Image: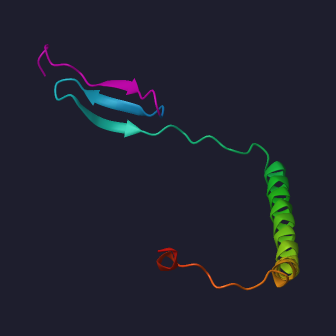
Amino acid sequence: MSENALEPFEVLCPCCQARLRVDPEMRAVLSHELPPEERTVKDLTQAVMGLKAEAAHRQAKFEESMKLEKTKKDLLDKKFQDALKRTKDVPVTKPIRDIDLD
C-alpha cells in the first residue's frame, strides 16, 4: 500500500450506537456491528409478576365488558319503552310535503 492511502476507520452511530467501519476513499460503510441488546427485565420473578398483573387487568376488563353486554339489552328495552310512552299520546298527522305548501 502506498503511504497516501487512507485506512478505514470506525465510527459509532449516534442513533443506534452501532459500530461502523468506513472507507474514506470510497466513502462507504464496509461493515457494521450492532450494539449488544439491553435486557428489558433485570429479574425474572419481576417479569413473571408483571405478566400476572397484566393478565389480571385483562381479565377484569373482560368481566366488566361482559357485565355491560348483559345489561345492554335491558337498557335498550327500557329506552324503547320510554320513547314509546312519550309518542303514544302524540296524534298521528299526515306529514306536510313541499308540494302541499304551494
Residue at position x 80%, y 64% in the image: 58
Q: Is residue 45 above or below residue 88?
A: above
Q: Which residues are magenta?
A: 1-15
Identify which residue, 6 or 62, lies in the foreground.
Answer: 62
Left or right relative to 28: residue 78: right
Identify which residue, 95 or 27, lies in the foreground.
Answer: 95
- Quarter of the image for residue 64 reads bottom right
Tell which residue pokes out farthest to the front in this image.
Answer: 102
Residue 1 spot, x, y in % from top left: 13, 22
Residue at position x 51%, y 79% in the image: 100
Residue 72 spot, x, y in % from top left: 83, 77
Residue 25 spot, x, y in % from top left: 16, 24
> Total marks drawn?
0
**85 inside magenta stretch:** no
What colour-coding does the image apply?
rainbow
Q: Is residue 85 above or below residue 33?
A: below
- Quarter of the image for residue 42 reads top right
Identify which residue, 18 or 72, lies in the foreground.
Answer: 72
Left or right relative to 94: residue 50: right
Tell which residue pokes out farthest to the top in this image.
Answer: 3
Residue at position x 84%, y 52% in the image: 45
Q: Is residue 3 above or below residue 66?
A: above
- Quarter of the image for residue 9 reads top left
Residue 35 spot, x, y in % from top left: 50, 37
What is the magenta segment's predominant secondary structure? loop
Residue at position x 49%, y 75% in the image: 98
**10 inside magenta stretch:** yes
Q: Is residue 61 above or below residue 89?
A: above
